Image (cartoon, rainbow, N blue to C red):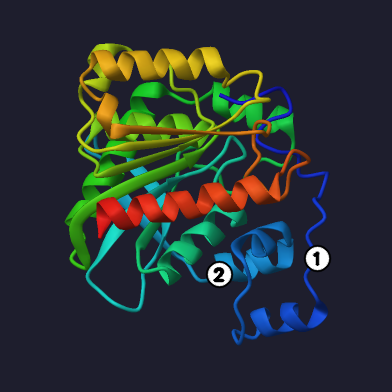
Amino acid sequence: MCTLDGCGSHADMPPIFVSATDRRAFLAGLGALPLAAVLADPVLAQAAAAKVTPVSITTVMGKPAKGFIAKPAQLPAPAIVLIHEWWGLNDQIKAVAADLADKGYIAIAIDLFGKDEPATTADEAKAQMAALNTEDATDAVSSWVYYARDLQDATDKVGTVGWCFGGAWSLNASIAAPVDATVIYYGNVTRTVSQLENLKGPVLGHFGTLDQSINKEMVEGFEKNMAAAGKADSLTVYWYDADHAFANPTGSRYDAADAATAWQRTLDFYTANLT
């Protein structure tokens, strides 16, 4: 679920400065930059996205599914399935996958829309999200989880992460298939107790106090139902004085400090539950 102008606006860039020297070094493969700086610069995001490799699978229901994979230098490694915002699988999500691979994970950025190109306007994003078949998407996310767990280079640990639309589907994936660590960035978390009883591993949620759609009422309902499902101890929720899509550096609601804190908490969560 996204607000009317979506998971960040591509038209408004936040004030993230990357020097010409740092930019050239990164493009030459000689230097490292903070993830936020890479994601905020289209050229750098594209360069980081080039590090991932196309991958395709046949789902449990026999349908084709596409994504991109990045592997760390040291294998075997835990795997993380990344689920995009309502824009679709763009360079930003691929760049996050590349960053996770640099941090020691097999990262698989999946494509739930099956589009050759991601949306660039809110109307396009809204249309492709509305057209999504829930049964097919559930088949896809669960199949990617099983694929990640069965990879020859993988350990037996699998996590998920998603933002906005993808945050909701990160949770859906973990309900549909056994997952060891679920991360939700401001995704719709309205689920029944019976659905939440299917969760196998801990859940981490990042939410903004200024978010009008993924709001306190929804998240408190989620916490209540998790408790009723016997999952209270496995849920960690963090609130940030921020709006929806606060972790998207290409959006007008980006909050650099909160995004950095949330990302570090995400990495710590994965370290605790996947390694």
- Amino acid type for the residue under numbered disc 1: Phe
Q: From this view, report whether residue 170 is shown above or below residue 37.
A: above
Residue 61 position within the rendered picture, expressed as x and y whole percent measured from the top left? 24, 33
Is residue 233 in view?
Answer: yes
Q: CA distance from mark 2 to mark 1?
A: 22 Å
User: Which image quadrant: the C terminus?
Assistant: bottom left
Left or right, residue 211 beside residue 271: right
Mark number, residue 50: 2
Residue 191 appearing in the image: no
Marked residue nearer the N-terminal end (2 or 1): 1
Q: Is residue 200 above or below residue 29?
A: above
Q: Nearer the viewer, residue 242 or 35?
A: 242
Q: Which residue is mark 1?
A: 17
Residue 273: image location, x then y, percent: 26, 51
The residue at 72%/49% (across/down) is 250
Whole-percent x, y for residue 175 in the image: 27, 28
Q: Quadrant of residue 5?
A: top right
Give x and y (percent) for residue 125: 65, 32
Q: Is residue 242 left or right of residue 49?
A: right
Rendered residue at 80%/51% (across/down): 14
Q: Which residue is drawn at the image coordinates 21% and 46% (left, top)?
A: 146
The quadrant in which the N terminus is found is: top right
Q: Bin the neighbour count of mark 1 within 10 Å (Cα to Cα): few under 14, some 14-19, many 20 and up.
A: few
Q: Nearer the viewer, residue 24 or 134?
A: 24
Label 2 secondary element: loop
Local crowd at mark 2 within 10 Å, few (<14), some, or many (≥20)?
some
The quadrant where residue 77 appears: bottom left
What label does residue 201 carry, if any? none
Quick check: 205 above or below 53? Answer: above
* Callout 2 amino acid: Ala
